[in-house]
Amino acid sequence: MPDSAPNPELLHSLGRLVRGLSALFWGLPVALIVCTRTAWSDGLHVYHVVPLLATTGLLYFGLWRLDSFQKQERPWRNALDRSKIFALINVGLSPFVFLWNQRPELIFFNISLLLLTLSAWFFLFSLNGVLVRLGAMLPDETLRHETRQFTSLNRILLVALLLVAVLRLLVARIPHVPQKFGPVLELWDRGALLLLILLGLLPLAMTMALLWKTKEVILDSVFGVKKN
């Protein structure tokens, strides 16, 4: 590390960056748990839409905290802005998880929930793009290599997740299925559901690991500056 005094503005932006990465790290699993629990049970209904708005809002807040870092880097800014758009859409659509649980027979609520699911998919996909751009700007070759490798894998898994979900929906809408194919379709439906869970949780977990790793690299760099 150089012996010169650290730039206070840079340290301030790095501090915001670390807090933003922490918010994203904790916000991803909490938002998933809250949305799932609100959709399929009544445990959080006493709070209405507040937990949904709070958890999805935490993800937008995390991206907002990254906003002050390297404003002049256009690829980084473009990736961050795309992810912020989807995070904001998630906040706006999140109340429909609660409304769908109350009235699942309404078509409008079903469409809104589908749009939220698609927006969440695009958010996680774009967040991996943010991590790639961020890793490219940090002075750690190991982090840069791991970020490129795991974000590429995450995107492949997310595309596979989307394809399996679409195929499952199409198969479920096949009219007049012959009785002899009934057990096969039932087995496919169960297997596809397990595959969807696996394909959803794996990129989520790897994205969280990259968020944590990136935060640790930044903290180590800041402490290294302070020691000299």
Image: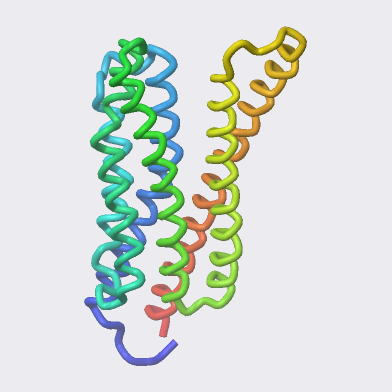
Query: Looking at the rendering, which quadrant does residue 193 occupy?
Result: top right
On screen, 160 above or below 38? below
Residue beneath the point at 27% across and 33% down: 93
User: Residue 178 or 194: which is nearer the viewer?
Assistant: 178
Q: Is residue 148 above or below residue 82?
A: below
* The furthest residue to the bottom: 3
> Given the current orientation, which residue lies at the most extreme top position?
179
Say which residue appears at 60% left-offset and 24% top-offset: 171
Residue at 48% across, 68% down: 217
Quadrant for residue 49, please give it: top left
Q: Pinpoint residue 182: horizontal percent, then vertical percent.
A: 71, 12
Which quadrant holds the C terminus? Answer: bottom left
Percent position (x, y) of residue 183? 74, 13
Q: Position of residue 58 (x, y in %)?
A: 30, 43
Q: Nearer the viewer, residue 76 or 29?
A: 76
Q: Where's residue 147, x and y in %? A: 54, 65
